[in-house]
Amino acid sequence: MSLTTNRQPPGAGRPQTLAEKILSRKAGRPVFPGELVVVEVDHAMTIDSIVPTVIARLEYLGKDPFDPRRVSLVFDHVAPPANVNVANAQKQGREWARRTGVNFFEVGRGVCHQVLVEEGIAKPGMLIVGSDSHSTTYGALAAFGTGMGATDIALAIATGKTWLKVPESVKVVMRGRPRPGVFAKDAALEMVGRLGADGATYMAVEIHLEDGAEEAFGLSERMTLANLTMEAGAKAGLVVPSGEILERYPVPEWLYPDPNARYAKTLEIDLTELTPRLSVPFYVDNVHPAAAFAGTEVDFVFIGTCTNGRIEDLRAAAEVLKGKRIADGVRMLVVPASSEVLKQAMEEGVLQTLIEAGATIGTPGCGPCMGRHMGVAADGERVVSTANRNFRGRMGSASAEVYLASPRTAALAALTGRIPGEEENP
């Protein structure tokens, strides 16, 4: 189907982007870039490492949640707790959730963004604010998801509203079906590399999938794309509804960008020509063909996170490792994005394949993504990770090197003990 139609919300003036249409609905009037607006929030989410500050802000205001059904607390970032301070913070969060009746997801349920999608909380056309920067992930469903600090989240919880500046939009068009061995993570890294770390600062990145890409990239892949828009500085990342999204969700008729909508810039990516990509230390936008670093020895491989911990990602790794063992001297940690992913991986035999190959399985959640627990990197180690950041100290030691890659590339690195060349296909 066409990704840009004449459908638009009543009262809209000049042609609008997807972000402008969603914020117009929430503001109750047509809005355009640069305007400061107060908008209705459909859902507010907070996490274990932030909730004590959110609670303190609410206590200062003397407020409880405006509507507990529109608030979620997810324990995922340091879960299970790694020390007494974290354990006490989680205890405080449990008590608050019990008292107020907000949606609460315990240790082991999974990463906040994965959980809100699985639970059916996130829906197309929503405005979702979260106390995690990768709340852009909800854009996979064409929801305006954005990260905010503890004070703003507390105000959204207390009032059901927030304020923001309507962002300009960047249009990213991805065309064609990717060749075998190339995944959404490769496309997302290519996008960030070409936009640059500040190429979409406080903008909405609007992703159009065309000429086969709309069928090649389902919900899981779109979550990866929307997630990584944050690494180009985006306020939100929105994938125009098509393919699997239309099959799984009731998408409102107005939830499409208008023809001739105004964009700050446009980027086009030919997926048929794309090869596996690698984000090289110490910046996410330092993106190169993986083959350019072929042969680089690695110590640690991590597969998981809100970027690439879904069943499709674990399957891709298991396909590489089935009947084989990871290289001597390499350790491999796999952390499913949620308990549902873990259960499905067990039922399909994916988990057994990974364990037999030598992988260690972690509690569903964020794992060592931000270097606070569950297998941080030591001095001088090289890590191939399916996460979203590779800054100095991100996964532990400041001297460790983190290379971001797709689950397949990561699994190949675990199998051979080095970054694979483009031709490798065991």
Image (tube, rainbow, N blue to C red):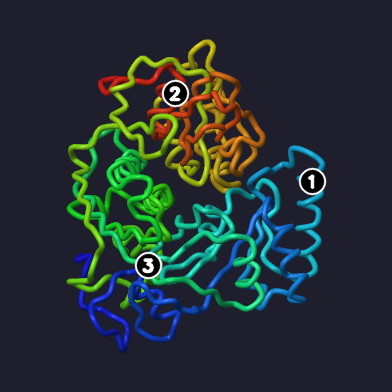
Would you call the spot at circle 3 few (<14 residues within 10 Å), some (14-19), or many (20 or more)? Answer: many
Image location of residue 258, percent across then percent down: 23, 73
Residue at the spot 22% in from the left edge and 52% down from the top edge: 267
Nearest to the eye among marks 1 and 3: give it: 3
Q: In this view, does 283 lie above or below 192?
A: above
Sequence-wise first label, 1 or 3? 1
Q: What element carries label 2?
A: loop
Which numbered dot is residue 87? 1
Would you call the spot at circle 2 few (<14 residues within 10 Å), some (14-19), or many (20 or more)? Answer: some
Residue 56: image quadrant is bottom right
What is the CA distance from the residue labelled 2 to the residue labelled 1?
A: 38 Å
State the quadrant of the C terminus: top left
Count of numbered circles on the image = 3
Residue at the spot 47% in from the left edge and 63% down from the top edge: 145
Q: Which of 11 and 413 is in front in this view?
A: 11
Residue 23: image quadrant is bottom left
Nearest to the eye among marks 2 and 1: give it: 1
Which numbered dot is residue 322? 2
What is the CA distance from the residue labelled 1 to the residue labelled 3?
A: 38 Å
Q: What residue type is labelled 3?
A: Pro
Which numbered dot is residue 263? none
Q: Is mark 3 on a helix, strand or loop?
A: loop
State the quadrant of the N terminus: bottom left
Q: Which of 351 and 368 is in front in this view?
A: 368
Sequence-wise first label, 2 or 3? 3
Image location of residue 376, percent across then percent down: 62, 29
Which numbered dot is residue 167? 3
Image location of residue 254, percent across then percent down: 31, 77
Q: Is residue 210 left or right of residue 353?
A: left
Q: In this view, does 34 lie to the left or right of 154?
A: left
